[in-house]
Amino acid sequence: MAKTLLEIKRELDANVGKRITIKANGGRRKTIERSGFLEETYPSVFIIKLDEDQNAFERVSYSYTDILTETVELMVCEDDGSVREVKL
């Protein structure tokens, strides 16, 4: 697990443009799973462009703190089709 928000941001910067699957805690025992592309990273948040056929909205944003507190888990789909969980 990453110790700082800067390390998390650097890891995500290296994966911009790649296919991402997100598992987010929706509260009250709900887990939300979405997939899309890591579109951009900003100093405090990162943006995921979601698959249009599966979601009612285009983009979703999360903060790096969400990853640090394990509210959000990310899995990166590599070019060869393999999936790896981002261990931050």
Image (cartoon, rainbow, N blue to C red):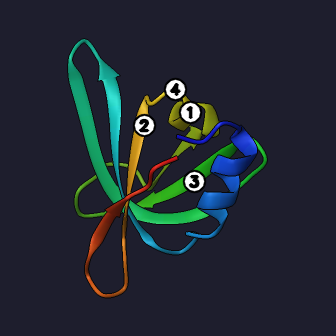
Q: CA gap, disc 1 to disc 3? A: 16 Å
Q: Secondary structure at mark 1?
A: helix
Q: Which residue is mark 1?
A: 68
Q: Residue at x 44, y 55 (%)?
A: 86
Cβ atoms at labels 4 and 1 below 8 Å apart: yes
Give the mark nearest the N terminus, 3 or 4.
3
Mark seen at residue 72? 2
Residue type indicated by callout 2: Val
In-image side of 22 versus 1 (left or right): left
Name the mark nearer the viewer: 1 or 2.
1
Q: CA gap, disc 3 to disc 2? A: 13 Å
Q: Residue at x 66, y 64 (%)?
A: 13
Q: Residue at x 61, y 50 (%)?
A: 46
Q: CA gap, disc 2 to disc 4? A: 8 Å
Residue type indicated by callout 3: Ile
Farthest residue, direction top = 28
Cβ atoms at labels 1 and 2 below 8 Å apart: no
Res. 30 image quadrant: top left
Q: Is residue 77 at least partly visible in the picture?
A: yes
Q: Which residue is mark 3?
A: 47
Q: Secondary structure at mark 4?
A: loop
Mark seen at residue 69? 4
Name the mark nearer the viewer: 1 or 3.
1
